Image (cartoon, coloured by chain):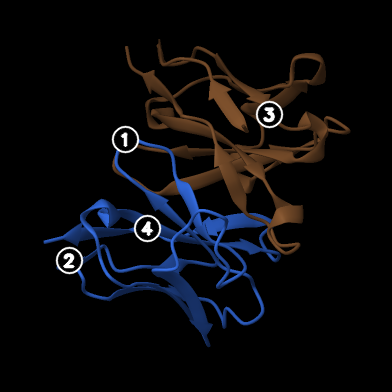
Chain colours: A blue, B brown
Amino acid sequence: QSVLTQAPSASGTPGQRVTISCSRSSSNIGSIPVTWYQQVPGTAPKLLIYNNNQRPSGVPDRFSGSKSGTSASLAISGLQSEDEADYFCAIWDDSLNDWVFGGGTKLTVL
Amino acid sequence: QVQLVQSGSELKEPGASVKVSCKASGYTFTAFALNWLRQAPGQGLEWMGWINPNTGNPTYAQGFTGRVVLSLDTSVSTAYLQISSLKAEDTAVYYCTRDAFSSCSKTNCFDYWGQGTLITVSS
């Protein structure tokens, strides 16, 4: 079974750069596109990054995605208080015919 | 503007059924697949399945065959999620979301979401 692992928490101070990682247990993420979602508590998730590193219109370029080997990463530069949220990575797993989500990383802006 | 508006919260007893609606507006309803996900309290996201708005054909995630039925009414641009034989562990916020495959470089991504519907299963 494919599992995406994320650290449960991360933190940073305003202006800092933080990175949130997402690793796949079963095999190399390889060519599988990774998406990232931001969820402010009590609201619906918001699409942040698609196809590993592309931002939808309206998402600030402070947010960037990358991928290497078995892991994908979301970087947030120039951290702002409104970035405090939960961040989830996700992939479509062809072998399972299922969307697999990471457990989420709760980002705290100190 | 694109909107997905879901029906309101519900409290159900174990064994009952529930039907959640998701009304789409601001885009051509048949152009985008609709997916359903749920999020148990304090937990992550769990994909339940999707429905093809052109054919009405649903596809269910492995853990959701049997008690879950996805349907839609294209005349009112609305998708439905029905869950039967509810259990306490079905308590969650349920989301509908649009798969914007064509807008996401031919990869699957969920670009618009409903506001969520809290289903509480308790006696």
Mark 4 → mark 2, Cα distance in angstroms: 17 Å
Q: Nearer the viewer, residue A28 or B52?
A: B52
Q: Report x, y in % for residue B64.
A: 60, 38
Q: Name the residue under label 2.
A: A14
Badge 4 density bin: few <14, some 14–19, many ≥20, Cα 10 Å = many
Q: Can residue A34 be seen in this view?
A: yes
Q: Is residue A24 visible?
A: no
Q: Tag on residue B107?
A: none
Q: Which of marks 1 and 4 precedes in the sequence? A: 1
Badge 3 density bin: few <14, some 14–19, many ≥20, Cα 10 Å = few
Give the amino acid at mark 2. Pro
* Front label number (1 vs 2): 2
Q: Report x, y in % for residue A80.
A: 24, 60
Q: Tag on residue A42?
A: 1
For the image, the number of numbered tags is 4
- Same chain shared by disc 4 and disc 1: yes
Q: Which of A105 and B63 is in front in this view?
A: A105
Instruction: Say what secondary structure mark 2 lies in.
Output: loop
Give the amino acid at mark 3. Gly
- Direction from residue A11 to residue B92 in the image, left or right: right
> As displayed, is residue B100 above or below residue A42?
below
Badge 2 density bin: few <14, some 14–19, many ≥20, Cα 10 Å = some
Mark 4 → mark 1, Cα distance in angstroms: 14 Å
* Front label number (4 vs 2): 2
